[in-house]
Image (tube, rainbow, N blue to C red):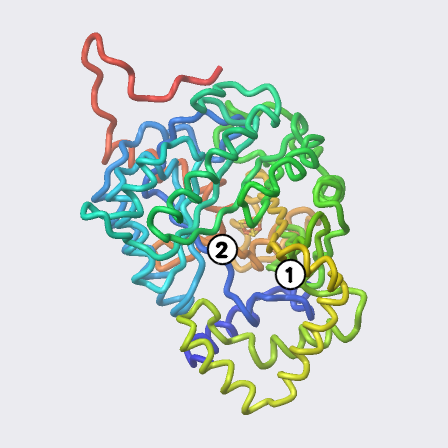
Amino acid sequence: MDPETRAVYARRWAELPERSRNPGQTIGRHAVGCEGTHGVFPRCNFSCQPCYHSADANHVRVDGPHTIARIREQMGLLRQARGPHGHAQLIGGEVSLLEPHDHAEALAVMRSFGRNPMSMTHGDFDYDYLRRVCVDGDGRPRFGYVSFAGHFDTTMIGRTGARRPVDEAELHGHRQAFCDMFARLYEEYGIRFYLAHNMTVTPANVEQIPEVIEACRHMGFKMFSFQPAAHVGNSVRWKDDYRSLEAEAVWALIEKGAGSRLPWEVLQVGDTRCNRTAWGFYVGNRWHSLLDDTNPRDLAARDRFFRHLGGVHFNAPPRLLAARLARVAASHPSTLATGLGWLARAIRRAGPVELFHHRPEPMTFVMHRFMHADDVAPAWELMQRGETATDEKILETQERLAACSYVMAHPESGQLVPACVQHSLLDPEENRQLAQLLPLPSRRRGTADPRPAPIR
Ligand code: SF4
């Protein structure tokens, strides 16, 4: 294990509140959590209801040099504070408003700091845009592998061909078209891809979750991530009482769509009131968990994985990874037997006959519950003073912020902040300043307004 990674993991584990230090916790044992950019291209050409960006975000011009410079600074701090490897989201705003070469350079800069970047997009762009991001002017692939998260749901207003979708099914064609672009990119240039599907959940579309999963799980997505809406960002765009969305009820609908119970405690990412994640794979129409949470031998295998393989960086070139695994097997020979035992049980659960007929398709289900700005503000204020809340709700918020698995970097202060804090507290002032630094071009008479249509 890389000594720097070891030190970062130890610090992350020590920072976790007691309730999150449990046998299934991945943070501090196999991961440091996710990272995201902020203030690098806050503008978006959609008008989602809700939107977690502050009202001024759409008054900031998209500016490639600004984007690249800020990303470089933010990645520098993340590299320094969180070690040589990480998963980072290239997120604004809408990433496809960047010129293709700026988008490509942003990804390259993130990679140069050891980050595995994922572009977060509404997916309303064409194949030519994607090709120009991923392929250089001489027709050579810039990357061997790309990772995108496509956000598709009925809270979004402005999509070409589905400006105000009435139900989720109306977007299935757009979801498929998004996946098809990447399949074509692979066919033409050999660029591999990982696609996640993001959906904001509101009282208006929550019941449609099962149908979305059932209809879209063969399209090419490897992850379905659901974000119950929170009262954060531009309050003009809040349309419902989002506090009515219960975690259990939403997860039950995700399970209904997956066609299986989704065990989320066996492997955890931070506080389970923020995140539920179920890693597994489909064989035919049946989803299987990577680990059987009812089998003590699978739980023992998980514990051994954390102990002996947790620090291995798996996203490495195959030869390097093989050498690392061989070293672990040589120094802890019993890990090999544990691994083979787990594999045999997984094959038995999936069914050898079914496996003969169907290739296993990895699929991860996620629920990420952002917190309401009204809860985050007092909790964070107390945390900055080193005080623990006495109010139960604010104490819960503090515990969740302390275990946060999704942070953003502030190189000017050296601080890493949870995304909830960024969007609840810091975005408004940051975007106000950016709107002065990077104002939109002024409108000339007779030309179209470059800003998205106002929301009433
Ligand atoms: S604190 Fe907020 S940003 Fe962090 S993991 Fe929890 S919900 Fe996500």
**What residue appears at the point 71 percent right and 57 percent down from the top-left corner?**
288
Q: Is residue 35 left or right of residue 139?
A: right
Percent from the top left, x then y, of residue 355? Answer: 69, 60
Contact, CB < 8 Å: mark 2 with mark 1? no
Observer-nearest of 175 and 139: 139
Q: Residues within 10 Å of mark 1 (few under 14, many from 20)?
A: many
As shown in the figure, which amino acid type bears the numbered disc 1?
Answer: Gln
Measuring 46% from the left and 39% from the top, which residue is drawn there? 180
Mark 2 burial class by Cα count in 10 Å: few <14, some 14-19, many 20+: few
Q: Position of residue 203 (x, y in %)?
A: 68, 28
For this rendering, which residue is in front, 430 or 213? 213
- Residue at left 65%, top 39%? 213
Whether ligand 1 has any atom under 8 Å from the Cβ at mark 1 is answered as no
Counting from the top left corner in percent of width and height, residue 231 is at 58, 34
Q: Callout 1: helix, strand or loop?
A: loop
Looking at the rendered structure, the kind of residue marked 2 is: Gln
| Secondary element at tag 2 | helix
For residue 81, what is the image quadrant?
A: bottom left
Residue at the spot x=45%, y=67% of the render?
315
Quadrant hosting residue 40 = top left
Does residue 310 sit above or below 56 in this rendering? below
Residue at the disc numbered 2:
384
- Name above or below for residue 331 compared with residue 352: below
Sequence-wise, the earlier of marks 2 and 1 is 1
What residue sits right under mark 1 in the picture? 268
Residues at marks 2 and 1, CA–CA distance in whole angstroms:
26 Å
